[in-house]
Amino acid sequence: MPSARRGHKGLLAPQGLGLLWTDASFRERLVPSGSWLSVEDATDFARPSTDLERAWLADGRRLECGVPNLVGAAALEVSLSLINEAGVDKIASHVEGLQRLLLGYLAESPTWAAEAARLGGLLEAGRLGAILGLHHGESGAAAWDALLREGFSQKIYASVREGYLRLAFHGWHRAADIERIAEWLVDEAPAA
């Protein structure tokens, strides 16, 4: 089963670079788009570039569309080093603790109690990632827009997708951030 990660999301790297893990047997079934770097002996410039008998590389380089994003790769390496130094399990545990804290605050709010219970159940079942998606009934786009604008004015950055307010947490967030978010959500909740 393939697994992909975009570098600019939770991996803290710039946009334009991602990682794709595949099983070797799956990778062999993929048809590369073709690049001069995707074939064996790519840098053997004594071999004619019209030599179409070159085999695809067996590893992930066969899927490269062109020259690798070296600046992005250097930044991703630093980001991954930082994440590994902090510890992936520690970051995940920290994020879960922040989510529990926010859901605890929201459980006390009549506006958000049902969502806090729904998300709390997903958290307990181990089915919640680093992004909380809060749904607020039938609030329309104007209500969500007003909520986001107020959040932005308080340096709280979130997004709305398909009727869900998306809040993403990472290792650098602190309990004080959660308290600010909870206050914002309770004070500025869109009307149902």
Image (cartoon, rainbow, N blue to C red):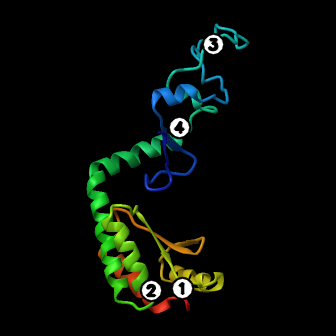
Sequence-wise, which precedes: disc 3 or disc 1?
Answer: 3
Q: Amino acid at mark 1?
A: Glu
Given contact means CB atoms under 8 Å apart, are the residues at marks 2 and 3 in contact?
Answer: no
Q: Which residue is disc 2 drawn over? A: 184
Q: CA distance from mark 1 to mark 4?
A: 39 Å
Marks 3, 1: nearer the viewer: 3
CB-based contact (under 8 Å), mark 1 and mark 4 = no
Foreground mark, 1 or 4, reads: 1
Which quadrant is the C terminus positioned in?
Answer: bottom right
Whether pointer 1 and pointer 2 mark residues with C-beta atoms closer than 8 Å, the reply is yes
Could you say whether the residue bearing mark 1 is in a helix, strand or loop? helix
Q: Secondary structure at mark 2?
A: helix
Seen at 43% across and 85% down, the residue is 112
Q: Is residue 116 left or right of residue 1?
A: left
Q: Position of residue 160 (x, y in %)?
A: 57, 73
Residue 161 seen in the current view? yes
Q: Position of residue 27 (x, y in %)?
A: 52, 29
